[in-house]
Image (spheres, rainbow, N blue to C red):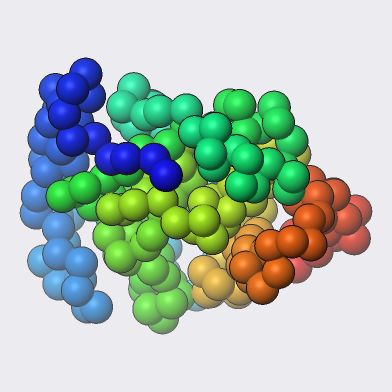
Amino acid sequence: MQEGYSGGSFEASYARLGARLERKTRGWRCDSDMRGVNSEHLQEGGLRVDSHEVGEARIKEMTAGVAKYMRGERELYFRHSEALTAEWKAAIGGYFHQELLGNIRTVILQGARIPPPPFYTEAKKLSGGRFPDFVHMASITYLDVIVFHDEIKQRTLFHGLVHAAQMAFLGFERYVDLYVRGFAKNRSWLAIALEDQAYKLDARFANDPTRVFSVENEIKLWAEEGRFDS
């Protein structure tokens, strides 16, 4: 429904974004063992975690690093973003508040990929490899900006919007704190309660799009039951 940048008024903007992503990606390898990762990036906002128990001081350090990364990426992509189209709003509007949908921005990367975050290699180590390669993910949500690889698909958009709704309801700082604590506790990206809920809700949506439900109510219920703390 929404086209990627291919010309017109977005041509120069997209070219500048592509050049910045190329600079950020240069020096990284995204294979399974990540040998040869640019160590300079690990020192700049890296988590520096190990395979042992993660203490409270380290949790706070990790949380600050992730929050800084997400804010920085949001600023990078926001200036190249577009509002959610009317077609997409109509397709999923019943599940989300209109205010949220009105604030969401989208970017479609074509011929470029989201580079690994500064904490990527150490997160892989902490999780025993159970941390995703960002370059292979369909989309990533940076606060109110959802960045897609190649195209927007309905289920992928829904998943990204669940994360945006979680941040809006919980607050960004609380969201990041819960995300990091969930990862440090479970040592698995998919076991983080925030991700678990997003995947459960996007599967529910995909299985029967005619049965509309309130995503915010689902988030509120999980928060009241303390399920995000697990």
Q: Position of residue 51 (x, y in %)?
A: 45, 75
Q: Quadrant of the N terminus?
A: top left
Q: Is residue 170 left or right of residue 223?
A: left
Q: Position of residue 105 (x, y in %)?
A: 47, 31
Residue 90 appears anywhere in the view: yes
Nearer-the-camera pick, 178 or 162 = 162
Q: Quadrant of residue 123?
A: bottom left
Nearer-the-camera pick, 110 or 219 = 110
Q: Quadrant of the C terminus?
A: bottom right
Residue at 11 percent across and 66 percent down: it is 36
Q: Is residue 41 left or right of residue 51?
A: left
Residue at 79 percent across and 62 percent down: it is 211
Q: Is residue 23 above or below residue 123?
A: above
Q: Is residue 27 above or below residue 32?
A: above
Q: Position of residue 126 (x, y in %)?
A: 43, 72
Q: Is residue 24 left or right of residue 218?
A: left
Nearer-the-camera pick, 62 or 134 = 134
Residue at 74 percent across and 61 percent down: it is 210
Q: Quadrant of residue 18?
A: top left
Residue 184 appears anywhere in the view: no
Residue at 24 percent across and 78 percent down: it is 32
Q: Is residue 46 above or below residue 136?
A: above
Q: Position of residue 86 (x, y in %)?
A: 54, 32
